[in-house]
Amino acid sequence: MPFLVNVALVVIWALTFVVVSPRASAQSVPHATVSVIPVDDPRLDRIVFDLEITRLSDHWELWGNGTFRLTNPVLEATGGIDSSQFTVNYYPSSSALPIVGYNAIALEGYVIQADLANGRLNVSILSPDGFSDCVRLPVKGVALRLGRFELIRNDGAQLSGDLQWVAPEDYYQANAFKIDHDSVTGQGAQRNTWYASDDNIPLVTRYVRRPRRDSCELLVVNDFAGQYIGDLAVRLQFTTECEVNVDGFFIERALVPAANPTAMVFEGRPNLDFLNNAVLRSCVCRDGRSYADLLDGVEYRRELYAYRLCSRETGTENVTYHDTIYIRVPSPIISNARLLQNPFQDQTTVEFNIDDRCRVSTAAYDLGGRLLSRLLDENGNEILDREYAKGEKYTATFFTPEYASAGIYNIVIIAIPVDELAIEEQSRVVLKAQLVR
């Protein structure tokens, strides 16, 4: 029995050591930087600020959670930030983290809680239960925005001063990452360190206050463009300048009626909405960025589609419509077909483009409609009901039969979209080729 007690004491001591060791190593090289960044705001009754985290080392990649405490030095003299006189708000959709509602049973995303207590502003961010749902920071030196917040004076009077980290920082602040292995069964230095898989491991963190972030001028959107890329798919892109006061972007689509283009009705596309697609969330940055390879699936060929780019202002429901573009989905799917040898003797090659994924058949006929032979692909195989991907400069070769006499022959290429087998959708090309003997 004494032996068992001694083992238990060793286990308790080891667990305790892991928890307190980051404070003991506060002077070592930090693994992360957490920054509070004031944001210019014309309203004098509030302070708007961002929280960001930046990975500095290879010690971690998966961010877990954090508790951050801030104070206002001007208010410290009168007891700090009184919850009866001030309010703190989180700006919805301002975090780069996948935010979910709190669930005590299972948490598959992050939860942000901001409140006032003991004269301080507190921001707590709870992590998912498992490391597989955590956000990975693969690039050192690139900041991840945890969220934008505002401290408001309830009586509307001017709020003086600015926000500072509550000190001592290694006591009042907490920041952790998640491991993606069980160290008890790990190898080398990772083995027997007395914490289990999925646990939050404290980070050695430097807490800083960066210079005020200007709100810049109005959002500018440039180069909104799109193209049909085949397979009933459209690719869109645009660039921005100054996204500080923007929650995110969404793109609406309308089918343009040929008889009355003004009657088109725009509809939302879930995959092109920042509420469903994290790629379209605002960077909340001054310089803006590029948004590319935004894909949308259409239903019909031979139709004109309109795409409208919109943004939503941070903290409001105000929507701005920036630009509208039009994209026609074509019907022809064979283009630029030409004979490389004409007139010809023993053989001639057809070069052509495929504008959509389709099934292709080729043949050579005399003027009486008699089939001479199928054309062959680059590998010598007959091209008959063969699937081709969208692409340029495919070739098909007609080898002249010995019995063929000099004259004019029809080289025929027929293609039908893979997902549209209606006869009216087929593309048909006929090339006149002259055989000389």
Image (cartoon, grey):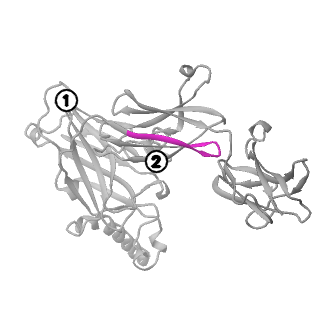
User: Which residue is at 35% across, 28% downward?
Assistant: 316
Q: Which is more toward the observer, 69 or 5?
A: 69
Q: Is residue 350 rendered to the left or right of residue 159?
A: right
> Looking at the image, can residue 91 be seen?
no
Q: Relative to residue 192, is residue 323 depicted above or below?
A: above
Q: Is residue 411 rendered to the left or right of residue 391?
A: right
Q: Residue 183 location, x and y as percent?
A: 44, 71
Amino acid type assigned to the residue bearing label 1 in the image: Arg
Residue 43's mark?
A: 1
| Mark 2 and mark 1 residues within 8 Å of each other at the beta carbon | no
In reply to whether residue 227 is colored magenta, the answer given is: yes
In reply to whether residue 207 is colored magenta, the answer given is: no
Q: Is residue 293 rendered to the left or right of residue 394?
A: left
Is disc 1 placed on a helix, strand or loop? loop
Q: Residues within 10 Å of mark 1 (few under 14, many from 20)?
A: few
* Residue extent of the magenta highlight: 222-234
Q: Residues within 10 Å of mark 2 (few under 14, many from 20)?
A: some
User: Which residue is at 21% across, 34% downward?
Assistant: 41
> Looking at the image, can residue 187 be seen?
yes
Q: Relative to residue 365, is residue 79 depicted above or below?
A: above
Disc 2 vs disc 1: which is toward the camera? 2
Amino acid type assigned to the residue bearing label 2 in the image: Ala
Q: Residue 131 location, x and y as percent?
A: 46, 58
Say which residue label 2 marks.
292
Q: CA distance from mark 2 to mark 1?
A: 35 Å
Q: Which is more toward the observer, 406 or 294?
A: 406
- Dot 2 or dot 1, earlier in sequence: 1
